[in-house]
Structures are given as structure tokens and as C-alpha cells.
Amino acid sequence: MYYEINVSKDGVHLFATAERSIPTASWARKVLEYICEKFPESEGFSVTIFRWEKTGTGFTPEEFFEMKP
């Protein structure tokens, strides 16, 4: 799981944080607070935050080769 913060200016994408930048909710709160302070709505900025979750499934080689493509 990780958090991504996106910033746009007047409806145009400006930047987003990298996947590895914000791995926890507590760090996301700190970073989000800082970004909202530096990029205020009153100056045409829009800030959004997403929580992304990734899952995976492990297989033995035998199990993998038995799977249908």
C-alpha cells in the first residue's frame, strides 16, 4: 500500500508524488499538510490524495505452468 498526492494548477496537472515516497498514512498526513500549505486553493491549486493497494499471488513453477493462459 502507498499514497499518491497529485497537484494541479487551474485544472492542469502539475506534479504527483512517486510510489515509494509515501508508504504510510501518518507520513501521508504530514506531506499532505505541507503540500496544501504550499499550494493553496485560493491560488488555483487543487490537491488530491489516493491510497493505492497492490496484491500478488505466489506460485510454484509447477502451479504456474499448469495454469491456462
Image (cartoon, helix red, strand yellow):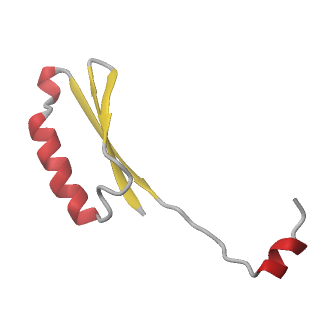
Across and down, in percent, residue 26 comes to 22, 65
Quarter-of-image position of residue 13: top left
Q: Nearer the viewer, residue 21 or 10?
A: 21
Q: Residue at x 66, y 73 (%)?
A: 57
User: Left or right of 20: which side holds 31?
Assistant: left
Q: Nearer the viewer, residue 45 or 62?
A: 62
Q: Residue at x 87, y 69 (%)?
A: 67
Quarter-of-image position of residue 23: bottom left
Across and down, in percent, residue 27 comes to 21, 61
Q: Residue at x 38, y 53 (%)?
A: 19
Q: Residue furthest left?
A: 37
Across and down, in percent, residue 28 comes to 24, 57
Q: Is residue 21 above or below residue 12?
A: below
Image quadrant where one finds the C terminus: bottom right
Q: Residue furthest front?
A: 61
Q: Is residue 41 above or below residue 1?
A: above
Image quadrant where one finds the N terminus: bottom left
Q: Residue at x 20, y 56 (%)?
A: 29
Across and down, in percent, residue 9 comes to 25, 22
Circle count:
0
